[in-house]
Image (cartoon, rainbow, N blue to C red):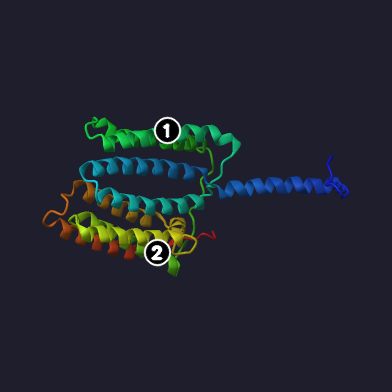
Amino acid sequence: MDQKPVPGHDALVPPDAETARRYLDEADAVAVRRDRAVDRRAIARLQILNAVVTAAFLVASVIALRRSPDGGAQVLLFAFLVYGQILSGAAQRSGLQWRLTRGRWQVVVVGAVIMVAALVTFGVAVFAPEAPWVMVVLPGALVLAALGGYGAVQLARASNDPHRPAAPRTPLPRGARAGTVGVGAVFAALLMLAAAPEGVLASVLLLLIALCVLAWLCAGATDLGLPALGARWRWPHETGLAIAATALVALTLFGRGGAEGEATAGVIVGCGVVLLFGGLSFVPGRDLRG
């Protein structure tokens, strides 16, 4: 072993053959532990899911902004921020590391170009109402092709990876249980706001929800935080989130801006979402120690 000593210090004594062999064995063991910690198949599926949700968010936001510049798009944005934080916890649970390596810079450049194109078409679709309706779906289509295509390639590469055993179940800790109920409360407030008539009260409620979401994002390192929920949640909790988000999008896009009976429907659906997440808070989650 040839080595260059640190100036002012003697060179280290090379290890004997047995010690060197142990070093190599430990390096192989580290690689094995890394492969066990990183679930490439789950990460690829999350990538595809993220592409679908982001594409749907962009299309729904364009439709909401074309119909009315106040209220609807902001409600969808807050819901998307909550989803993004939960997804980050699920991705980190699967071993995803947010770091840029030399081997990925081409993918990052191509993805950045497509994202810029999606933002440009998004602006054209919003600020040019005379633009054809194909522009409404084009931003979502670009994101779906870029992120979803990359996820599909990653999923194909991970097809031969061994299937991992199901994570052990454990009751949600007190903080995660409260956070689960909090997610339901946030979506309930957004549902009521989406169905409320436009006016000063709706603007005040929107500001209060924004402050609550911001404060919650600052608590991301605790069991109450959204990333911690994403790491602990299982499919029942994720299904509940999908139901709440679908109801919010439907009420935002197909509502008639505070028509008679719509505000009542928003309150009823919102209360149902709170009850749903209250029940889900007692559903066992993932044991992160397993």
Q: Where is residue 49 in the image (x, y as percent from the top left)?
A: 39, 43
One can see residue 269 in this view = no
Residue at label 2?
A: 179
User: Which residue sits at x=36%, y=62%?
Assistant: 212
User: Which residue type carries mark 2?
Assistant: Gly
Binning the other alpha carbons within 10 Å of mark 1 as few (below 14), some (14 to 19) or many (20 upward) gives some
Secondary element type, mark 1: helix
Q: In which quarter of the image is the C terminus?
A: bottom right
User: Which residue sits at x=61%, y=48%?
Assistant: 34
Q: Position of residue 270 (x, y in %)?
A: 24, 60
Q: Where is residue 52 in the image (x, y as percent from the top left)?
A: 36, 41
Q: Is residue 284 above or below residue 111?
A: below
Locate residue 119 relative to residue 189 in the image: left or right: right
- Furthest-left residue in view? 260
Secondary element type, mark 2: helix
Residue at label 1?
A: 114
User: Which residue sits at x=43%, y=53%?
Assistant: 85
Q: In which quarter of the image is residue 272?
A: bottom left
Q: Position of residue 198 (x, y in %)?
A: 19, 54
